[in-house]
Every structure is written in C-alpha cells, then in structure tokens.
Image (cartoon, rainbow, N blue to C red):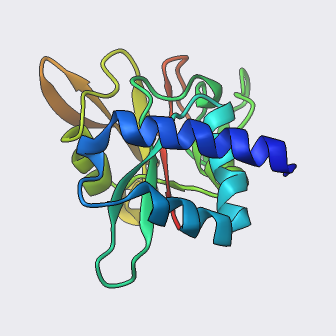
C-alpha cells in the first residue's frame, strides 16, 4: 500500500473512531494507530473492509492479549459483500443462478472472519445494525452438516438469529466481519 493511501485510510479510521467513542471506551487512538502501523497485513484487510462498504471500527480489546477487534459497523450489511450464499459447498450445490461467491470465501479473501452469534449480538449493543439487511454469521458444524446456515438481523427493536439453507442468497444478505489486530 502506498504511503498516501495508507495515510488516507488511517485518517478515515481515526475520524470514525473519534465519532463513535461509545464503541471503544478506554481505548486511545494513538495505541490503535501504533498497532496498525506494526501490522501492515491488517491495514490491507481494513482497506478492503472499507472499500466494500463495511465502515470498520474498533469494538473492543482483549485485556489478556491486547488485541484490538475491528468490526464492520456500517448501518446495513456492507453493500460490496451482499448476494452471497454461505460457503463453497453451498455455492457448488447450486445448479443455476449461482452468486459470485460465498460469505466464507469472501471473508477469507479479505482476511477477516464471519461474526459468531455472540459477536453479532454484542455488536448490536453498540448500535442498531441490519434494520433492512441481514448478515451471515459463523454457523456451528452440526447445523452446517444438515445443510443449514445462520444469519442475523434487527427487526421490531430486537435482534434475531435465523436459519436458512446455506445455498440460499438474497440481495439484502451479506457478511459482516471481524479482524483482530
């Protein structure tokens, strides 16, 4: 990443960080920037999260390891990461009208992880997300083995986690991801 591009990304991340301090109380931007500058791979992932509409922001820090967690904090599931089935197996199972990719593959390509149900619910305590869209979440193997996958959204003032066939995809369903740095 060129220095100018890196600086522009860091400025965008800092502006979002400062605008939404309730997401990361007791975390200082100077420490976040220092950690990011020490991990150029993380900056590449954050650049892709930003480019696909994720609006990544810090949502926590592991007190034991010091690792920061960035998450997609766009109001709706990122526009550049929608219309995806759950994983490669689901994509391969589709006979027609295949989407371009899957949520699991796209997350891996970006260098992020799908949110777990617990992470998705924790994110929803920091704001109201997915009021019109939904996001695939990491599905337990026993559910996936039966052909299903989980997704979440917020409707009627509540957070819901649902199931669907893993091969399904909708224009309003995509993926939110997390990155630990």
Q: Is residue 16 visible?
A: yes
Say how many tags the image has.
Answer: 0
Asked if 115 appears above or below 102 in the picture, the reply is: below
Q: Residue furthest left?
A: 157
Q: Is residue 145 visible?
A: no
Q: Residue furthest bottom?
A: 64
Q: Quadrant of residue 139?
A: bottom left
35 horizontally vs 63: left or right: right
Asked if 8 appears above or below 59 in the picture, the reply is: above
Residue 4 at what x, y percent from top left? 82, 43
Q: Quadrant of residue 38?
A: bottom right
Asked if 16 appears above or below 42 in the picture, the reply is: above
Q: Quadrant of residue 155?
A: top left
Residue 60 at what x, y percent from top left? 32, 59
3 horizontally vs 55: left or right: right
| Foreground of the two, 176 or 31 | 31
Q: Residue furthest right?
A: 2
Residue 176 at what x, y percent from top left? 48, 41
Residue 32 at what x, y percent from top left? 48, 61
Q: Residue drawn at (40%, 20%), measured in percent from left and top?
A: 133
125 horizontally vs 82: left or right: left
| Foreground of the two, 30 or 91 | 30
Asked if 99 appears above or below 22 in the picture, the reply is: above
């Amino acid at each position: 990443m060129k220095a100018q591009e890196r600086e522009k990304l860091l400025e965008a991340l800092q502006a979002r960080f400062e605008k939404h301090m309730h997401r990361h109380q007791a975390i200082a931007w100077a420490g976040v920037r220092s950690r990011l500058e020490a991990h150029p791979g993380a900056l590449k992932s954050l650049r892709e999260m930003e480019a696909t509409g994720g609006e990544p922001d810090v949502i926590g820090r592991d007190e034991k390891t010091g690792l920061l967690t960035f998450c997609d904090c766009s109001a709706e599931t990122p526009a550049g990461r929608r219309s995806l089935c759950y994983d490669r197996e689901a994509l391969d199972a589709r006979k027609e009208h295949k989407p371009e990719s899957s949520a699991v593959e796209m997350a891996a390509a970006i260098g992020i992880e799908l949110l777990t149900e617990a992470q998705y619910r924790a994110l929803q305590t920091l704001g109201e997300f997915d009021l019109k869209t939904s996001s695939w979440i990491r599905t337990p193997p026993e559910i996936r083995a039966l052909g299903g996958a989980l997704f979440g959204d917020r409707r009627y003032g509540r957070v819901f986690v649902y199931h669907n066939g893993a091969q399904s995809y909708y224009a309003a369903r995509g993926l939110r991801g997390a990155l630990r740095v």
